[in-house]
Every structure is written in C-alpha cells, then in structure tokens.
Amino acid sequence: MIQFENFQDFIAMGGYAANVWSVYAMFAVFLAFNLLWPLRKKKQLMREIKRRQIVNEQAHKQAEPETPVMQPLEPLADAASPAGDKS
Amino acid sequence: MWTWFHKLGSPKWFYDISGRWLPWLVACMAVCLVVGVIWSLLFVPQDYQQGLTNRIFYVHVPVASISLAFFPLMAIAGTVSLVWKMKLADVVVKVAAPLGAWFTALALASGSIWGIDTWGTFWVWDARLTSLLLQFFLLIGMISLRSALEDTDAAAKACALLSIVGTINMVVIKYSVLWWDVLHQPPTNFTVDNSQPNGPEIWIPLVIMFLGVYLFFVISLILSVRNEILRRERRAQWVSELAAQ
Amino acid sequence: MANAHTSTFSAFKATLKRDLLIAYKRKNDVVNPFMFFLIVASLFPIGVSPEPERLSLIAAGVLWISALLAALLAMDNLYRADYEDGSLEQLLLSPHPLFFMVLAKNIAHWLVSGLPVVLVSPLIAYMLSLPDGSYHVLFLSLLLGTPVFSLLGSIGVALTVGLGSRGLILAMITLPMSVPVLIAGTLAVQQTQNGASLLGFLAIMGAMLLFALTLAPLASAAALRISVN
C-alpha cells in the first residue's frame, strides 16, 4: 500500500524530508561514485597501456634495421621521446 | 581442490571469470536496489515511534552491517596473502581498505542523520557509532600506510599484518566501547527494539535492500580488484592483447 | 660476541641492558616524553577551567590521554636509531627468537618512557584535584595500562620504521588501537568513585596486558622482518 496521498506528501516525508532525502541522496552519490570511478580508472589504465604499446612498437621498428639483435635497449630510449611528445 | 585454489590465485583467471559474471551481478543489483528503494520509500508503513524516519534504516542497516565485514575480510585475505603469497589476496587487502572507508563513512553519516530526530542531536557517543568511527580511523591509517610504502611486496606484507592485528583489535575495541557505553549512558526511556514484532511489510524490503547493497559491495570490490590486476600486470602478454582490442 | 652458547634469556637481558644504557646516555629521550606529559597535562586546566570541581571530573581522562600522547611521542625511539645505525639488522640476524628481543626492547622502552609518567601521575592528579579515594586506582591502572601502549605502539613503529614521514601514520594506527586501554583505565577511576569494586577493573586491565604481552611482540617481530629486509 502506498503510504502517501499525493506527491507533496511524499516529498515532505512527514516532516522528515531533510533527513530522509539527504540519506538517500548520499546513498545515490555513494553508489554512483563507487561504480563510475573504477570504470573511469579502467579506461585511463587501458589508454595508458595502449600508449605504452605504441611507443614500444615504434621503438622496435626503428631498432630493427640498425641493430637487429644486439642492443635493443638504447634505441628504445631514443625512440620513446618523440612518441611521448606526440601524445 | 588445490588446482582450484591455484586458479583463484591467478590474476588472469580471475579477470576472465569476473568479467563474465559482472553483467549478471550488475543486473541483479540494479533490480534489487530499484525495487528496494521504491518499496522502502513508498510502501513501508510508518513506525509508530519514529514516523517516516524509519526509511533511513533501509539504507543505514545494510551499509553498516557490511562495513563491519571489512576488517574480517581483510584479515582473511591478509592471512592468505602472507601464508600462500597469493597475489590476488593482496589485491583484495589493498582495494578493500578505501571501499571499507566509504562504507563506514556512509554508515556513520546515515546513522547520525537518523539520530537527529531520535536523539535530538546528530552525534551521540553511542557504542555502535563510536566503534564505527574508530574503524574509520583505522582504515584511514591502513590506506596511508599502503600509500607510504612504495615497494609493493613489503607493502603487501605490512598491510596484511596490519589487517590481522587491526581485526583482533577491532574485536577488543567493539567490546570495550560497548562496555564503556553501558556504564556511561543513563538509562533512556527510548528503546530502539520495540516489543511489537516487525511484520513482513517491514523486513521484506529490508532483505531486498540487503541483497542490493551486498551485490553492490561485491561488484565494486570486483571492479577495483580488476583495475588493480590490470595495473600490476600491465607488462603481461594478456593485458597488452586486451588493450589492443 | 654472541656465540652459540648464549641462552635466550641472557640475550634478552643483554638487549634490555643495552637499551637502558643507551637511554641513560641519551638523556633527552628520557626527559622529553616526560616533560611532554607534564606540559600536556598542565594545558588542560588552562584550556578547560581552573575550577577544582570541573577539573576533578576530567582529571583521570586528562592523565590517561597525556600518558598516551607521551607514549606516542616516545615511540620513535623504540627502533628508529637502531634502524639507522644497523643494529636492528643485527638483532634480526641473531639466532635467538625475535619475540624475546622485541619484548626486551619494549620493556626497556616502557621503563624509560612509561614508568616515570606513572610515578609522577599522583602529583599531577593532585594538581588536577582528583577525588581523594582515586589515587591508588589511577596509579595501579596506569601501571597496568601504559605497558600496553608501548607494546601496541611497537607494532606501529615496526611497520613504519623505514618510512620518511611516519609520525602521522603511526598516530593513525596506534591511537585507535589504544582505545580499549584508555576506556578501561578511565572507567576504572570513574566507576570506583561510584562504588564499583576495583578488582574487576584491574582484572580486565591485567588481561589486556597479558594479551598484549603474548601477542604484540609476535606482531612486532613479524613487522620488523617485513620492514627491514
């Protein structure tokens, strides 16, 4: 059974509007924040991982013609900076 | 049995399986919360003493009861991470602390707002509120310890140890605060537990809210655990494949 | 020096003696927490009210909180210097169970920082006009309670010893954990004023002390092994 006669009564909450609605508002913020924040963070993480991949791939491409096996580390450091500027 | 245990320890396996479960969990949670909120706001009869403030209970009770579960959860995960060096357990210890702080903060806030009309003031040094407050402080201490220790291996061990010590301590704190409260409070003529048995129209929506908030707790824990797994395994092959998609 | 034949007990004694000797040589470490206790306790009459009636109500609580803060201030002495000069690593390498070495260090720490506070507490209590019948209760409860502060604080220090900014984290960890002792101690004073029996409170505080004595050094030892590697 609905406990309220009209919408005004529902909003007024029998005089306890401030208390009841503030708790439910906090609950909503709490739910939304704790669900959306991890999702946002996941997007950021994925973007970061992807960027790093691109950087690594470019580094390998530049490295291949000159030094195929011996020194993969040095050209990687060189190639990292222009890619970092681009993004 | 042990293969199952080892599987659970593998971050990739957890990431895959939780990814499959998440949509179902989210759907169940949404249904429970929508039904629970509408029912508790619109249909629950007034309490004969508290009037419509009893609606606050439908948020406060589930949130507060789950916030009490965080220390035991972290202690179990901490023990597993210390004894079996399971990576996933440490991830749980790490992400449970901030989530627990959120839950505890909401439980404190909703409890004290409920108190505005019941006690006439938003804060009294009631046993349950006080021990929740102390739990909040301890959780903040755990978060700051984690963020201060850069080395993840040492941080994992230290936080696991602190979660075990903290759980033992929380038990002692709870009982001592209860004892303190009993000896300090003058007997009040208002009692929360009324003699009338609560009918199903009171407790069914509460059970639904409980389910919804529990599912929310599980979902947000899983989401944070997944993120932390991605962060820690970012150099692994499967993560790069995932990112490349 | 420590050969295979030294018993654990003599190693325990040697650690205790060493820490006491260091404290004796570095008098600042002993005097500062004690002075801090006096200063904090004397701020309350200034901050709250100098009226004896009001002070007598809060005297026990003021003494307990001052003792807790003084213990917290002294906590850093427990392992910090040893960590910096490397003797903590030596301690971890010793063949004796770390439990007893940690216990010895905690006892030495309490003797240096806790005991003076307990001994001077009746005087401060008088200055805060504690009711007449409560002096022995306060003294005995502090005697049982302050070692627990040292034992619990030791866990926090052991966890944070390697950190740069550890003061606040240490407080965040240690202060909530000390609440049960604070509750028992202040309740003992207040309730015996109302005619409750002292023995029950002393039994509870004694139980807390024994509990802390058996478990806290274990946790401290584990924490030290984690922090120092």
Image (cartoon, helix red, strand yellow):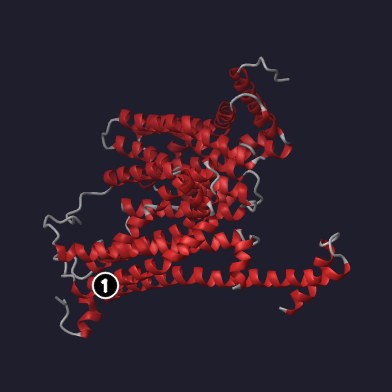
Tell me, yes or no, if residue C42 can be seen here. Answer: no
Q: Which residue is mark 1?
A: B35
Could you say where residue B174 lies in the image, as x and y percent from the top left? 35, 46
Decide which of A71, B148 is in the foreground and name it: A71
Q: Residue at x 39, y 32 (%)?
A: C205
Could you say where residue B78 lies in the image, as x and y percent from the top left? 49, 46
Looking at the image, residue B16 lies above or below residue C182 = below
Decide which of B204, B108 is in the foreground and name it: B204
Quadrant in which the C terminus of chain C is drawn: top right
Looking at the image, residue B145 lies above or below residue A66 = above
Q: How many dots with numbers? A: 1
Identify the image quadrant of residue C132. Answer: top left
Q: Residue at x 15, y 70 (%)?
A: B45
Amino acid identity at mark 1 = Val
Q: Is residue C30 left or right of residue B69?
A: right
Could you say where residue C92 lies in the image, as x and y percent from the top left? 65, 32
Tell me, yes or no, if residue C168 can be seen here. Answer: yes
Mark 1 belongs to chain: B
Q: Secondary structure at mark 1?
A: helix
Decide which of C106, A84 is in the foreground and name it: A84
